[in-house]
Amino acid sequence: MQVNGEFKPLIVAFCCNWCSYAGADLAGNNRLNYPAEVKIIRVPCSCRVNPTFILRAFQRGADGVILCGCHPGDCHYTSGNYYTRRRMAMLFSMLDYLGIERERTRVEWVSAAEGAKFAATMNDFVAQVTALGENKRLEDLRCKK
Amino acid sequence: MQRIGVFVCWCGSNIAGTVDVKAVAEALSHEPGVVFSTDYQYMCSQAGQDMIKASVAEHHLTGIVVCSCSPRMHEATFRKTATAAGLNPYMVEIANIREQCSWVHKDMPIGTEKAIILGKAAVAKVHLNAPLTPGESPVTKRALVIGGGIAGIQTALDIADAGFKVDIVEKKPTIGGKMAQLDKTFPTLDCAACILTPKMVDVAQHENVRIFSYSEVSEVKGFVGNFDVTIKKHARFVKEDLCTGCGACVDKCPMKKVPNEFNLGMDNRPAIYIPFAQAVPKVATIDPAHCNMLKNGKCGLCARVCTAGAIDYTQQDEYVQEKYGAIVVATGFNPISMDKFDEFAYNQSKDVITSLEFERLTNAAGPTAGKLLRPSDGAHPHTLVFVQCVGSRCTACAEKGKEYCSKICCMYTAKHAMLVRDKYPDVDVYVFYIDVRTPGKNFDEFYRRAVEEYGVKYIKGTVGKVVPENGVLKVQASDLLNNKQLHIDADMVVLAAAIEPDRSARPLATMLTASMDTNDFFTEAHPKLRPVESPTAGVFLSGACQGPKDIPETVSQAGAAASKVIGLLAKDKLMGNPCVASSNEAMCNGCSSCANVCPYGAITYEDKEFRMPDRTVALRRVAKVNPAVCQGCGCCTVACPSGAMDLNGFKNDQILAEVDAICK
Amino acid sequence: MQKVTASQLIDRAAALLSDGSVSAVLGWKQGEFDYDITPAVFADEQALRDAFVWNDFCGANFSKYLLKATKKVDGKVLVFLKPCDTYSFNQLLTEHRFDRDKVYAIGIPCEGMADIDKVKAQSGDGIVSIACGETIQVTTLYNDAPVSVELADVLEERCANCKSKKHVAYDELLGDEGDVLDSARFDEVAQLEAMTPDERFAFWQEHLSRCIRCNACRDVCPACTCEKCVFDNPASGVENKAPANEFEEKMFHIIRAFHVAGRCTDCGECSRVCPQNIPLHLLNRKFIKDMNDNYGEYQAGAEVGSRAPLVDFTLDDPEAADVLDRRG
């Protein structure tokens, strides 16, 4: 999205309820700033995130999608994030294979105690996606230029 | 179409300082389905909640969006408000415009714009919300404890003392487990039998406890609060209720050459036997593999000497069905087999023994009546070598041993060494170790005493080979601290064999749908915060089945497991979490992907008849989620290729609606 | 040339039909052209003798057809399985998609199937008839004498890169058993991976822009056996046909490849049937290669009941970033 001639990316962040969403809350409690471009969607566990959700976000105009969950070994549901790790590794590798910039996707493990990490991660991710500019590729994948 | 009310909270200046709450309320009032939109200083206050209730009535609201602090803070509050207003509590969605908006953004226009988007996402989601009702299930007020060692006994006693019925299932003829075989216990050196056997008697005499000895769990159905368990009682050919445990049959049995498992085969027992003097129940058992009467009908001596008339050669295995609200696994451990450790000559020499065998050798009720005698010839030994970590911490030899630390060996070896030096100061004792690990109250002091007061020779290094030669054991070892090779002529070598979960644990885990790690230890619901619960609701863990443990730890965990069971049984009914997975049978392929990823074993399959378009009826395998067991992670929804599996409260279309609202 | 003959198959099928062991036969028959061979169900010997075909153009994998055939037919269905088909057969059994007791499977050796486009490249267009024997004899409108084409020169891509001549499932085997091959099937994926992102994007844009969303790849796929496909299901949130919504215009192939990841046996039917010649197998093979590289070798369908990498995990799997970094 262009705001006053300046590119502002749209970032969708999926956060698991038990660790990362709580980590985001902690970032708020500690008033740690990160860009408003980040919009969080709460899911019970990172393993609830269907690749479809991520593709849909890109298709509807998101410039970057980040998925946050409990650290491996700390999943509230024991093993959910281990499945997430495999699924997202495979999905992101596939997007990269199609020539979509890998910097637009990220998985980050953020615990409920890591408010600072949450804010730092979001600052970093937004900067990274801003540098890339608008997400055209997934839009254009089917169009012969 | 929902009639949605939007309530934007100021949270004093917490939100209103960076978000123009009136603008948010105004913007959201134009969203489809929103029939009422307002703002208030403190929405969570009584006045705020009253306003929500009044608005529900006045505007006939069917759904509520509260733009406020984190749902982790007040979602429960507003759900209660909705309930009080006559709405289903799950018709409420929270837009987190404080922690994730006003507190992290400084600029009013930016904060306001984001708050509006978050509000729109919540409105989009609430459109697709459906009333959810938590399932209720009754709780059978009886617990099952599987395993009758110290872990099972302690758990059963604690549950029984709280007033609930408990059954213990023990596969051996007596309860007592490994602790009954031990001599002294570290770090206090009190005798194991002296502290264990009173507990065995207590549990046996407890009015709330039933003991199924010589029995196994053969089938488990059902779920938390409602397990249906089949217990197989092996035929012991002795009527338990008639046998007085007098032992006359044991004395008279002519078949006396059966290796005695209680003494780990170091002496013999008759074909009819009572494992040890303090066995509970103190009842004889006939070993059908060795009894002449059962094998070929020739003998019958025990029946003739039994004045109680308890012998019954026709007894059959019996199956008992019982319902339980909770199940505690306390299946314990065993030392690993030494077959793969040829270098220590365990199978070549009787004088190479495991530490558990050593316990029996030094026990007054053991095969040598407590005298330390060399097993091969009964001579008094002069040099003993203890080898630590045999099969433990085997990173390079995973096919032989275990990668983990067995945890108890350092301490019991210090105990063994100390006991030997105490009784027989003329015996030289060497201990070869990788590290000496003594975390625990009074543990390191104990080990120091073995070294400093009792003169046990601790050598950091490994034993490479033990060769039996001319009646001695030639021990070749390395002393790593002094960097030299050692050759010791030992009379006995004691191997601290790694411990592993009992073999019965794996099939039991399958029956319980409880998860295990690669070493067959049961996994906890959470490694730190829920250490005595299995991820499978209603299944609890006690003792070494969860990981290597010493007695104090086992007893603490047993008590903790009991308290969790008591907490469960104290409830009359269980209210489920309604945000659970459910499968659309019409779309389900029955492929099992969902069950593969479910950590709780909540998904089963059944064959169901479907009417086909051509009017035929087809039988198809479809998934069924047990809402009492499902915890609502949603992992199955992604594993499902057809999208038949969905998660209440976080449905695919709800999350997609949020994505769309944010990306609009 | 194929090592077993059509008459061998017909005789065996006829024998099993007549002794009542099976009540229907799943086989191939000729379509509109000689090279256009389609699956068919044969109910009696006469039908077999009239129409059953087995030659260098019998690419169709019957595993998926068993879902319907076993429900429709009383008694057992006889199915002929080439080595690669047996993997799909096992994978469907793993997913409980048909009743094994209702199938009699005969494994038949396969020397690879011919790609008609490659045949045409040698013979020219205007094919009137094709006869498969020692070589493939192609008669066209423009040649007086038939053109002789060697099967080895015109193999389908999946056959040139055949992963296995071994049957992993059957009740009866005709001919000799082969081996699992050391195939070069991932070379093309590796070549793509070695390109720059821009080159990869251009490659896929070139190919995917040709997609007409005919759904042939999905319909033929033995892993796509859902009772209701998400793309046909209004409740899935991703449903729609090509023109109505641009969503799955772009996402269809990614979502489809993800849905079959770990379940795809790499039978290659998707690429075979694509009327636009989109190399769809390169999407599936990418997932297979990534899973092999990161989670250990896994061949879907090699055995019944195996657990696919995406419904499994280990405690020390690589992170998503590591998976991408590994390849550079």
Image: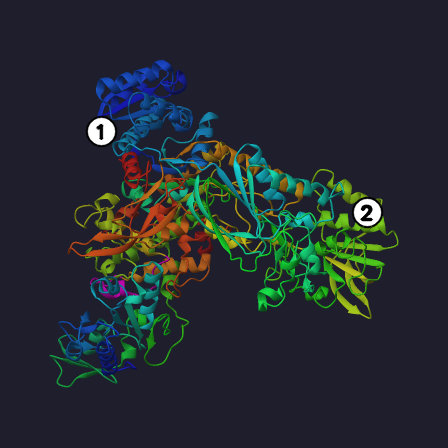
Residue at image mark 1: B2
Farthest residue, direction right: B426
Horizontal placement of C56 versus B189: left or right? left
Q: Quadrant of residue B380?
A: bottom right
Q: Quadrant of the C terminus of chain B?
A: top left
Looking at the rendered structure, whether the residues under marks 1 and 2 are on a common chain is answered as yes
Do tag 1 and tag 2 residues touch (Cβ < 8 Å)?
no
**Label 1 SS:** loop
Q: Tag 1: residue type? A: Gln
Residue at image mark 2: B451
Mark number displayed over residue A41: none
Q: Position of residue B480 (x, y in %)?
A: 77, 56
Q: Position of residue B225 (x, y in %)?
A: 44, 39
Q: Main secondary structure of the magenta part?
A: loop
Q: Quadrant of residue B133?
A: top left
Q: Chain of mark 1?
A: B
Residue range in magenta is: C262-278
Q: Residue at x 32, y 52 (%)?
A: B606
Say which of A11 and B611 sits in front: B611
**Label 2 SS:** helix
Whichever of callouts 1 and 2 sits on the residue coming sooner in the sequence is 1
Give above or below for C276 relative to B521: below
On the question of residue B436 being in view, the answer is no
On the question of residue B138 being in view, the answer is yes
Q: Residue at x 35, y 56 (%)?
A: C261
Horizontal placement of B189 versus A53: left or right? right
